[in-house]
Image (cartoon, rainbow, N blue to C red):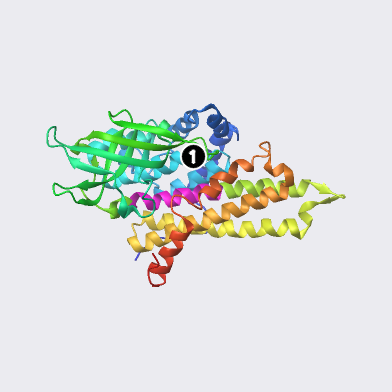
C-alpha cells in the first residue's frame, strides 16, 4: 500500500513552478510551436529556456542534476506548457520516459553520459517501442538484439514506427528482444542508440500539426550496440519498460489537461463577449452547459492525473500504479477532446480558423485518445485487472 497523499490545494512551491513555466512559455508567443512546425525546426529555444530554469528535468533525482520533484512536478510543467499553447511531446519522451528509465535503471556511466544532460535540457532522447505489427501487443515485438560474435556486444535489427521527436534527439531508447543462439526471441531489452549510429536511418511520416515534433519510422540494419548501452539487464522484460510507460501516460494526461484548460479559457471569454441580438451567447444554456460539463470532466481528470503521479512518486505497487496511470490518461484525453470540441462549437466558424488557435489543439488531443495506448485497451485493462472480468483479447 502507498502512503501517497494528494493535497487539495497546490503548495507555494508548485504554484511558483506553474507561474514560472507559464511566463517562459508565454514569452515565446502562443504560436511558437506552430511556427516551428511550419518551418520544420525543433522548438529548441523554448526547450533550452525551460531546461536552464530546471523544468525539463524537474522529475530527475537531484544527484543527477534534476529537481527531485518526480512526476508530480513534471505533470505540473506539462500542463502549464500546453495551457500556454506550447505543449511538447519531447517532455513526454525525453523527460518522462527516458529520464525516468535512466534514473531507475541506468548505470552510473549512463547517468553521467545522458541523464545529466537530459535533466539540463542540453540533450534529448526519443523512445521507440511501437512497430508496424506491434503496438499495444508489445509481446510481439520483432526488433531484435543478437550477440555480435566477431566484435562483441550486440547487433540491432528491426523497424519502429510513430516515434516522436527523433529530429531533435541525440539518441533513442529502443525496446528490442534478445535473440538467443538457439533462435528464440526472449523478453524485451532496452538499449541506447545514438542518432548518428551506422545502420540507423529514418523516414518522416506525414502528419497534421500535433506540436512542433515530427513522427518517424526508424530502421535498424546491423546497428552495433555495446554492452554499456543496455539499460538494465539483458532480457529485463516489460516490468522495466513500464517504469517508463506509466510516466508517459501521466505526461500525456498533463498535456491534455493543459490543452483543455486553454480551450475552455478561450471559449468562456468568447461566450462572455460575443453577443447575438444584444445577449452574450454564454447566457444560453445550449452554449453554457457543454462548457460547464467539459470543466467538470477536466477537473476530475486533473485529480486523477495528480493521484497517478503521487502513486508513481511513492513507488506504489505495479498494479495500483498501472491502474491509476491508465485511468488518468483515459480521463484526460476524453476531457481534452470534449473541451476542445465544445470550444470550437462555441466559436462557430471562427473555431475552425487558425487565428483563434482552437483547431491547432484538435489533432493533438484527438490523437491522445489513440496513443500511446488506445481507450479500448485501457478499458480492457480496467475490466480485467480492476474488475476481475475475463480477458477479452
Tell which of 6 and 177 is nearer to you: 177
Q: Which quadrant is the N terminus positioned in?
A: bottom left
Tell which of 124 and 351 is nearer to you: 351
Q: Position of residue 5 (x, y in %)?
A: 43, 60
Q: Position of residue 197 (x, y in %)?
A: 28, 29
Magenta stretch: residue 287 in it?
no
Query: Residue shown at 60%/32% (left/top)?
Result: 29
The answer to whether residue 138 of the structure is visible from this angle is yes
Q: Which residues are magenta?
A: 242-258
Q: Which quadrant is the C terminus positioned in?
A: bottom left
The residue under label 1 is 88
The answer to whether residue 3 of the structure is visible from this angle is no
Query: Residue shown at 38%/72% (left/top)?
Result: 390
Helix, strand or loop under label 1: loop
Residue placed farthest to the right in the image?
277
Q: Position of residue 276 (x, y in %)?
A: 84, 49
Quadrant in the picture for residue 353 = top right
Query: Residue shown at 29%/44% (left/top)?
Result: 143
Residue 49 lies, with reference to residue 317, above or below; the image says above
Residue 81 lies, with reference to residue 386, above or below; the image says above
Q: Position of residue 373 (x, y in %)?
A: 43, 53
Amino acid at each position: 500500500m502507498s502512503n501517497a497523499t494528494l493535497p487539495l490545494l497546490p503548495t507555494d512551491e508548485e504554484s511558483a513552478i506553474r507561474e514560472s513555466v507559464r511566463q517562459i512559455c508565454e514569452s515565446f508567443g502562443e504560436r511558437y510551436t506552430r511556427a516551428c512546425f511550419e518551418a520544420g525546426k525543433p522548438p529548441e529555444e523554448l526547450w533550452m529556456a525551460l531546461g536552464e530554469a530546471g523544468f525539463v528535468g524537474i522529475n530527475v533525482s537531484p544527484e543527477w542534476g534534476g529537481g527531485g520533484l518526480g512526476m508530480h512536478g513534471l505533470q505540473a510543467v506539462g500542463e502549464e506548457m500546453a495551457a500556454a499553447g506550447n505543449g511538447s511531446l519531447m517532455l513526454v519522451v525525453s523527460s518522462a520516459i527516458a529520464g525516468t528509465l535512466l534514473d531507475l535503471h541506468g548505470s552510473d556511466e549512463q547517468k553521467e553520459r545522458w541523464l545529466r544532460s537530459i535533466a539540463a535540457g542540453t540533450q534529448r532522447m526519443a523512445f521507440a517501442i511501437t512497430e508496424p505489427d506491434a503496438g499495444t501487443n508489445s509481446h510481439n515485438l520483432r526488433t531484435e538484439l543478437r550477440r555480435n560474435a566477431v566484435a562483441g556486444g550486440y547487433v540491432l535489427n528491426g523497424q519502429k514506427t510513430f516515434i516522436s521527436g527523433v529530429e531533435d534527439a541525440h539518441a533513442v531508447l529502443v525496446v528490442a528482444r534478445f535473440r538467443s543462439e538457439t533462435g528464440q526471441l526472449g523478453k524485451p531489452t532496452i538499449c541506447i542508440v545514438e542518432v548518428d549510429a551506422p545502420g540507423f536511418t529514418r523516414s518522416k511520416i506525414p502528419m497534421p500539426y500535433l506540436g512542433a515534433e515530427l513522427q518517424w519510422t526508424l530502421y535498424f540494419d546491423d546497428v552495433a550496440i555495446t554492452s554499456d548501452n543496455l539499460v538494465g539487464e539483458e532480457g529485463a522484460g516489460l516490468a522495466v519498460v513500464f517504469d517508463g510507460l506509466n510516466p508517459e501516460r501521466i505526461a500525456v494526461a498533463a498535456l491534455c489537461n493543459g490543452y483543455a484548460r486553454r480551450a475552455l479559457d478561450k471559449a468562456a471569454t468568447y461566450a462572455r463577449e460575443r453577443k447575438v441580438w444584444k445577449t452574450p451567447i454564454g447566457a444560453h444554456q445550449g452554449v453554457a452547459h457543454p462548457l460547464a460539463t467539459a470543466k467538470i470532466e477536466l477537473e476530475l481528470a486533473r485529480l486523477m492525473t495528480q493521484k497517478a503521479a503521487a502513486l508513481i512518486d511513492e513507488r506504489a505497487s505495479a498494479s495500483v500504479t498501472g491502474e491509476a496511470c491508465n485511468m488518468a490518461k483515459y480521463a484526460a484525453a476524453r476531457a481534452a477532446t470534449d473541451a476542445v470540441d465544445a470550444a470550437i462549437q462555441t466559436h462557430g466558424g471562427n473555431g475552425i480558423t487558425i487565428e483563434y488557435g482552437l483547431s491547432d489543439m484538435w489533432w493533438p488531443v484527438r490523437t491522445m485518445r489513440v496513443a500511446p495506448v488506445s481507450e479500448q485497451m485501457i478499458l480492457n485493462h480496467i475490466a480485467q485487472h480492476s474488475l476481475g472480468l475475463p480477458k477479452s483479447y
